[in-house]
Image: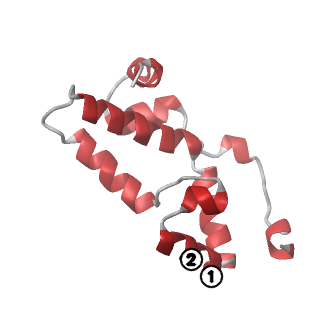
Amino acid sequence: MNKGIELATDYVLEKEDAVGRFRSKLASIFPFIFKRVDKTKQVAKSSGIDLMSTDELECKIEAVNTSHFPNKPETRKAKRYLIEQLISRGYKRSEIAKRFCVSPKTIYNILKSPL
């Protein structure tokens, strides 16, 4: 725990991928905990945070962006989930919009629409 306390926080809210970087840093300090959590795939139960790995997230964003059926309900749910993953990592809506090649208003509408 002392190693975790020593981590410099800087201006966390101003960094776009603060949560992901913090998770990576903690994983390097406590690899045995994160290996166990990743192995069981029960991140939410073990840590209270359900974040997929950055590589997996990038692959899923690419798959959604190249989907042939962008208006199917399943695709909209997938986009919403991925947007929520990015927001939880500290990305701004404008940055998320660029990743999905849509406007920030579209991101807002995706988040506001009922599932």
Residue 54: image x %, image y %?
45, 58
Name the residue tied to disc 2: 36
- For disc 1, the marked residue is 32
Pointer 2: residues within 10 angstroms few (<14), some, or many (20+)?
few
Position of residue 102 relative to residue 24, above or below, is above
* Residue at the (50%, 43%) spot, across then down: 86
Left-right relation of 34 to 68: right
Which residue sits furthest left? 68
What secondary structure is found at the residue carrying circle 2? helix
Question: Disc 1 versus disc 2: distance between alpha carbons?
Answer: 6 Å
Cβ atoms at labels 1 and 2 below 8 Å apart = yes
- The amino acid sitting under disc 2 is Arg
Q: Residue at x 59, y 66 (%)?
A: 24
Q: Quadrant of the C terminus?
A: top left
Secondary-structure class at tag 1: helix
Mark 1 burial class by Cα count in 10 Å: few <14, some 14-19, many 20+: few
Q: Is residue 26 left or right of residue 74?
A: right
The N terminus lies in quadrant: bottom right
Depth order, front residue of 88/45: 45
Residue in the image at 15% along x and 32% along y: 69
Image: 17 above or below 29: above
Where residue 85 appears, as percent x and y from the top left, is: 49, 44
Could you say which is closer to the camera, residue 59 or residue 80? 80
Q: Horizontally, is 22 left or right of 100 in the view?
A: right
Where is residue 28? Give x, y as percent.
63, 76
Q: Quadrant of residue 66?
A: top left
Q: Is residue 24 above or below residue 71?
A: below
Residue 93, which numbered label?
Answer: none
- In the rendered image, the vertical position of residue 96 relative to residue 63, given as above or below: above
